[in-house]
Image (cartoon, rainbow, N blue to C red):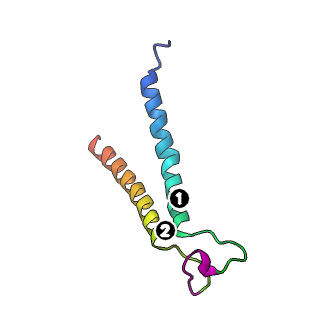
């Protein structure tokens, strides 16, 4: 084993980097997707969700709840990161 590489710290850095670097943007994308349900060609606008005046489907209550949860987790992670930086400087 190599003495100058701390493998315990290295795997922790990789996990946190993957969660914060790819996980939070992916969670934000899931929240955006929950606000914009998919449209199927040929399907009426009211078949998938409630329709707006323009005829585009919008998210229902479950979509808004899922998006709100995703955005709340992202905002909590941002707030936690700022508090760690401020309190440890």
Query: Given contact means CB atoms under 8 Å apart, are the residues at marks 2 and 1 in contact?
Result: no
Q: Is residue 56 visible?
A: no
Residue at the image position 34 percent from the left and 49 percent from the top = 80
Q: Which residue is mark 1?
A: 30
Residue 66 is situated, as x and y percent measured from the top left of the image, at 45, 63
Q: Is residue 60 visible?
A: yes
Left or right relative to 39: residue 88: left
Mark 2 element type:
helix
Q: Which residue is mark 2?
A: 63
Residue 70 is situated, as x and y percent measured from the top left of the image, at 44, 59
Farthest residue, direction left:
87
Crowd tier of the residue under label 2, counting other residues whose Cα lies within 10 Å: few below 14, some 14–19, many 20 or above:
some
Name the foreground residue: 15 vs 85: 15
Residue at the image position 46 percent from the left and 22 percent from the top = 7
Crowd tier of the residue under label 1, counting other residues whose Cα lies within 10 Å: few below 14, some 14–19, many 20 or above:
some
> What stretch of residues is rendered in magenta?
45-53
Left or right relative to 70: residue 87: left
Is residue 50 on the magenta stretch?
yes
Against 71, residue 61 (above or below) is: below
Res 40 label:
none
């Amino acid at each position: 084993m190599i003495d100058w590489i701390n493998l315990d710290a290295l795997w922790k850095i990789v996990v946190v980097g993957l969660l914060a670097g790819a996980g939070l943007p992916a969670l934000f994308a899931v929240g955006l997707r929950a606000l914009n349900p998919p449209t199927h060609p040929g399907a009426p606008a009211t078949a998938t969700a409630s329709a707006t005046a323009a005829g585009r489907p919008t998210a229902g209550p479950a979509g808004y709840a899922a998006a709100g949860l995703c955005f709340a987790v992202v905002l909590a992670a941002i707030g936690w990161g700022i508090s760690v930086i401020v309190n440890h400087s």
